[in-house]
Image: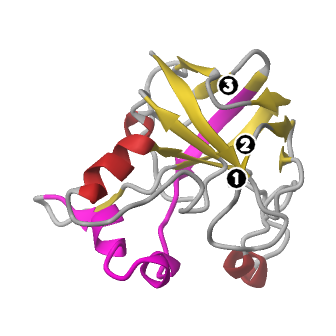
Amino acid sequence: MTGTVVAVSRSKEHTFTKPNEESITLLAGLGVEGDAHAGVTVKHRSRVAQDPTQPNLRQVHLLHTELFDEVVSAGYVVAPGEMGENVTTRGVDLLGLPTGTLLRLGEEAVVEVTGLRNPCLQIDAYQRGLLRHVVGRDESGDVIRKAGVMGVVRTGGVVRPGDTITVTLPAEPHRPLEKV
């Protein structure tokens, strides 16, 4: 399975949206160079408040443009970086990947998928009502999270729009993604 990097984004501040860049540099074990969420331990404000020594399983946020295509039918317009992602993708079923999947982004960078992004109320502050389109329930009543996946950087490197994404699945049995 392969896909494409559509856009790359980062923000030095804890902002909801992140400006697009010509490239970003992923740093092994840390995340996106110059991004507020880079680091060995958690940087997300609510998680820091709970326990600042937790490992940072959310170093890189990847979001699929297919979600943008889906929400436009409900009247929303979302562009790359506007939902806080670092890497916007096309052509990879991010939500269907198992935990531990390796994503090679471009020539060098490798991100290990750790889990699903747990969307928060900031999404509704960004565009009122959008949250219900990125979090829902299936027929059984289970929560469905569609706002992308989180990962940790295993191998650093530069990532640019247009780079190929190559997917390597972990050994079986596969573990489904859970919120991180």
What span is in magenta?
110-138
Q: CA distance from mark 2 to mark 3?
A: 13 Å
Disc 1 element: loop
**Which residue is identified by label 1?**
57
| Residue 75 rendering spot, x and y as whole percentages | 25, 66
Viewer-nearest residue: 71 or 150: 71
Q: Amino acid at mark 1?
A: Leu
Quadrant that contains the N terminus: top left
Q: Residues within 10 Å of mark 1 (few under 14, many from 20)?
A: many
**Which residue is identified by label 3?**
105
Q: Amino acid at mark 2?
A: Val
**Which residue is identified by label 2?**
152
| Residue 70 rendering spot, x and y as whole percentages | 27, 51
Q: Is residue 135 magenta?
A: yes
Q: Are marks 1 and 2 in contact (CB under 8 Å)?
A: yes
Viewer-nearest residue: 170 or 95: 95
Q: Amino acid at mark 3?
A: Leu
